Image: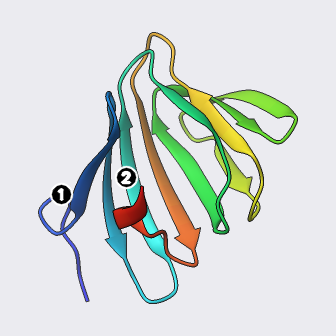
Amino acid sequence: MFYNYPKDFQAKELLPGWLVHYVVGEHMSFTYHTIQPNTTAKMHTHPNEQLGIIIDGEFEMVIGDEKRVLKKGDMYRVPPNATHGGYTYAKKALIFEAFSPPRNYAKL
């Protein structure tokens, strides 16, 4: 199966300034996040393993007790049930992520 971005992706505004486009497969989901400047993702947990890469911009991320400013090309892993969150500053961030098992976007 093939997908063209953005027409074949579902879209959802997670919160003001945070738009996610996603595709859900049988065993994983992919997301493409567009996060406007000065937007915060509150600290949260979920049972999914999460891998991400910064496509453009900057995103300060907290995973457990670690905090890091991520820039274009930086990658990260969030283990299942780990507390994490983050925010943008003056620059917009574009982030691509994979989740396994797939995220349930209807519940977000």
47 displayed left or right of 95: right
Give the crowd class for mark 1: few <14, some 14-19, many >=20 residues within 10 Å.
few
Q: Is residue 3 above or below residue 10?
A: below
Q: Name the quadrant of the N terminus.
A: bottom left
Question: Of residues 106 and 66, which is closer to you in this image?
Answer: 106
Which mark identifies residue 38? Answer: none
Q: Is residue 43 left or right of residue 2?
A: right
Q: How many marks?
A: 2
Callout 1: SS? loop
Mark number displayed over residue 32: 2
**Residue 28: x, y in percent?**
50, 78
Residue 69 in which image quadrant: top right
Secondary structure beneath disc 2?
A: strand
Quadrant location of the C terminus in the rendered image: bottom left
Q: Which residue position is annotated with label 1?
A: 6
User: In this view of the protein, can residue 65 be seen by the observer?
Assistant: yes
In percent of the image, x 39 and y 23: which residue is there?
A: 92
Three-letter amino acid code at the position of disc 1: Pro
Residues at discs 2 and 1 in contact (Cβ within 8 Å): yes
Tell me which label, 2 or 1, sits earlier in the chain.
1
Q: Amino acid at mark 2?
A: Tyr
